[in-house]
Amino acid sequence: MSESAGAVSAELGQLTGALASGASGAPNARDAVRALRPSQIREVANAGFGVPDVLPFWFGESDRVTPPFIRDAARRALADGATFYTHNLGIAPLREALGRYVGGLHGATSADHIAVTSAGVNALMLAAQMVVGAGDRVVAVTPLWPNLVEIPKILGASVETESLTYGKDGWTLDLDRLLAALTPATRMLMINSPNNPTGWTMTREQQRTVLEHCRRHGIWIVADEVYERLYYGEHGRVAPSFLDLATRDERVIAVNSFSKAWLMTGWRLGWLVVPTRLMDDLGKLVEYNTSCAPSFVQQAGIVAVEEGETFTRALVVDLHASRDHLVRALQSIDGVDVRAPDGAMYLFFSLPGAKHSLDLCKRLVREAQLGVAPGSAFGDEGEGFVRWCYACDPARLDIGVERLRAFLTANAGA
Ligand SMILES: Cc1ncc(COP(=O)(O)O)c(C=O)c1O
């Protein structure tokens, strides 16, 4: 053996010994990452792998493609060479267009408060990275899309959940309990309204009370408002928002997305409304996460925001009709308990056998070719329920309902 080969071999030997003795540990991810919950929705989808003709009501997206005027805008932007990096916070015309859009919905908002992100989930991560670190206490209102609970945990924060309760009026918030959980030691409240999965929508009065409480204790509010336009309640074209009440320079960060109101899930485009004081630091975080959202996608985003109002309003009319259609159809099945919530695009309902909702959903996909999401995917409070996304053609909803009816009849008393 040559001298250098001998040295390499000795080094390898030391390394192997160190690994075996555990001195540098086995090659694992950090504990906080290993402890993250895997997606139960994926688990159900995997159970349906290879099953023909499954109706996929499990994911949170419409069965329709993005409208042509937005796809055309992206095509034009690509043809014009919009293929380069952009400013970390987004291109100026999109930030300005979003400032006008948010301003039209929630009161004056300048482009200086807008940061463009790579969709809502990246906006949530950036907001959490801005505000929380290891050991911080976060409160989240559940049942909830798991990302909002898991993201702060990636950063080493601890998350306490405060559950909505289910009763004759559907899902409701016990405000006093939430306020009691929001102690001065709390760093951040994660709240999603209209809510995925329940469709629960916070009232303006509840928002006012929570905002005042958080102001008193210096608690950050991260408000996930990606479903704000999918709203069927009394306030008109948009759900009540913390942005209606908060100034633009206090501890409120609003998270939003192009995915839902313009059917742009696959484009990965979203935005944040944040205090201007945070912008320089936020720019650094964007740099180290994604550097920027894709240039041609941002160009298409301008067209969505500036020309998409008619489309969004028509979409909401269709979703409203689909919601009512599915509620009526499900109510005709014995043992199903379902209400029509004010927002989002899901029904979150209980049915026989859902006490173990993950098992039930796996059986539904294998035995009835019906894909719905288990309530337990959204927290322990969701056990006993399933989530059905109704953003699709009512005729497909009908086929799904008949499959569910047949499954429950076949398994009655089992
Ligand atoms: C509550 C909530 N927030 C954020 C998102 C993120 O969506 P996207 O990353 O597609 O913008 C979703 C997606 O379903 C969601 O349900």
Image (cartoon, helix red, strand yellow):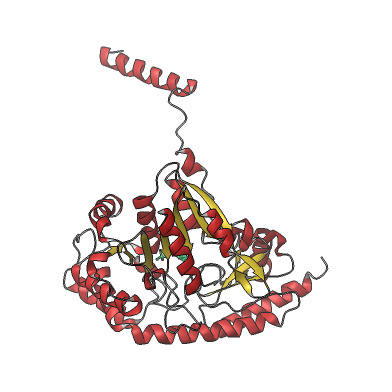
Q: Residue farthest to the right?
A: 413
Of 56 and 339, the residue lying toward us: 339
Q: Give the quarter of the figure containing the N terminus.
A: top left
Residue 399: x, y in percent? 62, 81
Residue 272 makes an appearance in the image: yes
Q: Is residue 277 above or below residue 8?
A: below
Residue 40 makes an appearance in the image: no
Of 311 and 239, the residue lying toward us: 239
Residue 228: x, y in percent? 43, 74
Of 253 and 94, the residue lying toward us: 253
Q: Give the quarter of the figure containing the C terminus.
A: bottom right
Residue 209: x, y in percent? 48, 66
Name the residue: 78% across, 69% down.
Answer: 411
View quadrant of ligand 1? bottom left
Name the residue: 39% across, 53% down.
Answer: 128
In the picture, measured across the screen, residue 350 lies left or right of residue 132, that is: right
Name the residue: 74% across, 72% down.
Answer: 408
Q: Residue farthest to the front?
A: 216
Q: Is residue 317 above or below residue 282?
A: below
Name the residue: 51% across, 76% down.
Answer: 343
In the picture, measured across the screen, residue 167 lies left or right of residue 184, that is: right
In the picture, measured across the screen, residue 206 lies left or right of residue 177, that is: left
Counting labels gives 0
Q: Quadrant of residue 56?
A: bottom right
Q: Is residue 269 above or below residue 150?
A: below
Residue 378: x, y in percent? 57, 60
